[in-house]
Amino acid sequence: MADHDDDFELVRGSGNVFADFDAPDANLRQFRAILAAEIVKTLDVEKLTVRDAEARTGIAAADFSRIRQIKLDRFTIDRLMRILDRLNRDVRVKISVAPRAGGKRASVSPLAA
């Protein structure tokens, strides 16, 4: 017979792993991660090395390496959007504003378009 002491509870996430773990600026981190994932996807689809991407965009190969390694602390949202623009990608962002619940700090909620 199986021992049921190792049962676990399944908890559904919010869709933002940063918020689920109470990270500061969770929505901004999520938005940067989404943009970085789109950059990596573009490099993969077009079979671009970081050197190829540098030649095409004028953005340092080291920056593309950091993005591939998900080292995003040096990247602002506008910088990531500029990189996507130079990779010939359009970025569409939908913004909605609502009153804050429970007196929490303001945040930005990114929506993939």
Image (tube, grey):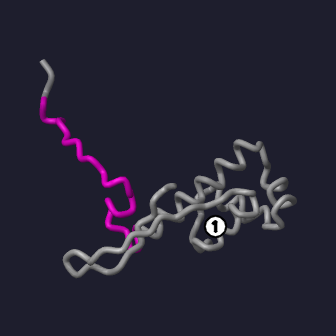
Task: Determine if the magenta segment contains residue 76.
Answer: no
Write the residue at 77% across / 42% down.
47
Q: Residue furthest top?
A: 1
Write the residue at 81% across / 63% down.
57
Q: Position of residue 60 (x, y in %)?
A: 79, 66
Q: Position of residue 69 (x, y in %)?
A: 62, 56
Q: Nearer the viewer, residue 68 or 101?
A: 101
- The answer to whether residue 90 is above or below residue 103 is above
Write the residue at 53% across / 57% down.
34
Q: Position of residue 50 (x, y in %)?
A: 78, 55
Write the residue at 61% across / 71% down.
75
Q: Residues within 10 Å of mark 1 (few under 14, many from 20)?
A: many
- Picture quadrant of residue 95: bottom left
What kind of secondary structure does the magenta stretch mostly adopt?
loop
- The answer to whether residue 4 is above or below residue 37 is above
Q: Amino acid at mark 1?
A: Leu
Q: Position of residue 17 (x, y in %)?
A: 38, 57
- Picture quadrant of residue 20: bottom left
| Residue to which mark 1 is pinned | 80
Task: Determine if the magenta segment contains residue 22.
Answer: yes
Q: Nearer the viewer, residue 7 or 56?
A: 56
Total numbered labels:
1
- Picture quadrant of residue 105: bottom left
**Could you say whether the residue bearing mark 1 is in a helix, strand or loop?**
helix
- Quarter of the rendering occupied by the N terminus: top left
Write down the region rendered in magenta: 4-26
